Amino acid sequence: MLQYTYTATGQKIRQQLVHQEGRVSNTRDYAGSFVYVNNELVKNQLSSQLHCNSPEISHQLKIYLKSTLI
């Protein structure tokens, strides 16, 4: 299940994938134009540059981008 955290003004600041047993497997944090997946910077939305050193996160990011751009 995806859980979202928002500021008082409605800006999304966190997305977490939480499993039925309560385990969090993926956290995505939003800080201005920056996106962090599991505390690793993966995208600066202003420059659209992708940075990722983890194959697992890279794969998850590709799936996320495909699902949001369709």
Image (spheres, rainbow, N blue to C red):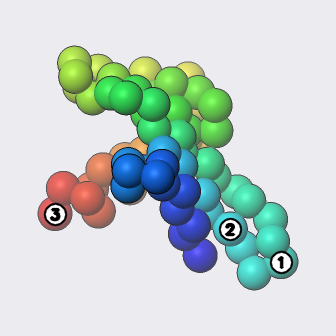
Q: CA distance from mark 1 to mark 3?
A: 31 Å
Packing grade of label 1 (10 A; few <14, some 14-19, many >=20) is few
Mark 3 lies on residue: 70
Q: Amino acid at mark 3?
A: Ile
Q: CA distance from mark 1 to mark 2?
A: 8 Å
Mark 2 lies on residue: 18
Query: In percent of the image, x 29 and y 62: which residue is there?
Result: 67
Q: Position of residue 20 (x, y in %)?
A: 75, 81
Packing grade of label 3 (10 A; few <14, some 14-19, many >=20) is few
What's the mark number on residue 41? none
Left or right: where 46 falls relative to 15 = left
- Choose the circle earlier in sequence order: 2 or 3: 2
Packing grade of label 2 (10 A; few <14, some 14-19, many >=20) is some
Assign a secondary structure to mark 3: loop
What's the mark number on residue 21? 1
Question: Would you identify the image quadrant in which residue 38 lies?
Answer: top right
Asked if marks 2 and 3 touch (Cβ < 8 Å), the reply is no
Query: In percent of the image, x 58 and y 27: which residue is there?
Result: 40
Q: Is residue 43 visible?
A: no
Assign a secondary structure to mark 2: strand
Q: Is residue 51 visible?
A: yes
Which is nearer the eye, 50 or 39? 39
Which is nearer the eye, 9 or 47? 9
Q: Position of residue 26 (x, y in %)?
A: 63, 52
Query: In percent of the image, x 70 and y 57: which residue is there?
Result: 25
- Choose the circle earlier in sequence order: 1 or 3: 1
Q: Position of residue 58 (x, y in %)?
A: 48, 38
